[in-house]
Image (cartoon, rainbow, N blue to C red):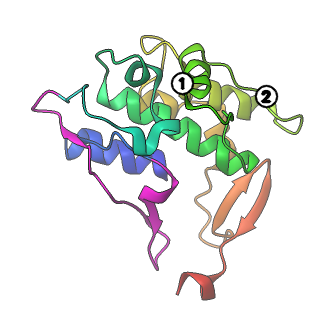
Amino acid sequence: RIITTLIYTHYTMKISHLTLNLNSIIIDKDLNIKLINFKYGCIYLKDCDASVNKDDMFIYNCPEIHEKKEFSPELADVYSCGIIVYYLCFGKLPFSSKAKIAIDELIIKGEYWFPKKANEKMKTIITSLMECESEKRKNLKQILSENWFNDIKNDDKNAIKGLNILHEKYPIDEKVMK
């Protein structure tokens, strides 16, 4: 749902988020994904400002932003989705170091590791999302064609609503949502 929400934001609204992170995603009472906090977002009709300081979401920024290069707003959001998916699947961020400069180097080089419990489809989708070379990174619509999404798509109205991680369903407690 996060990917389809971003597709709507990018292709219909012509807006990029640019600081997508776990705190910018909320779920409403009907279990719809909502994106908030477009502080550094940009409208596609204008150029995005690559010089904007995005330190508050440092770990979620794509390598191009870390290198202060020109970047595609859509592909920057795709990369941030990779960080979010990694966290949702494994409960931790892919890059860890006490030194900000060390994290910066890991992100630019694309150096992160998968826990043993990661299956191949999961590794493929995360690797696709977090491709450090922007010209090789898939766009939002291409990402939806990955095999991993076939495992989590379910149109059955009686299905458990919630997260599907490693083929295990984690239902969302309706009381908590209210």
Q: In this view, does 62 lie to the left or right of 118?
A: left
Q: Position of residue 134 (x, y in %)?
A: 43, 15
Residue to which mark 2 is pinned: 120
Q: Where is residue 58 in the image (x, y as percent from the top left)?
A: 47, 37
Q: Where is residue 141 in the image (x, y as percent from the top left)?
A: 42, 32
Q: Where is residue 105 in the image (x, y as percent from the top left)?
A: 57, 18
Q: In this view, does 44 lie to the left or right of 52?
A: left
**Nearer to us: label 1 or label 2:** 1
Q: Which amino acid does label 2 sit on?
A: Glu
Q: Is residue 101 left or right of residue 76?
A: right
Residue to which mark 1 is pinned: 104
Q: Is residue 97 above or below residue 70?
A: below
Picture disc at residue 131:
none
Q: What is the quadrant of residue 161 in the picture?
A: bottom right
Q: Is residue 86 covered in magenta?
A: no
The residue furthest front is: 99
Q: What stretch is highlighted in magenta?
A: 21-47
Q: Identify which residue is drawn at 48% across, 31% down.
A: 79
Q: Which of 30 and 69 is in front in this view?
A: 69
User: How far apart are the two marked residues, 1 and 2, measured between alpha carbons?
Assistant: 26 Å
Q: Identify which residue is drawn at 79% across, 47% down.
A: 166
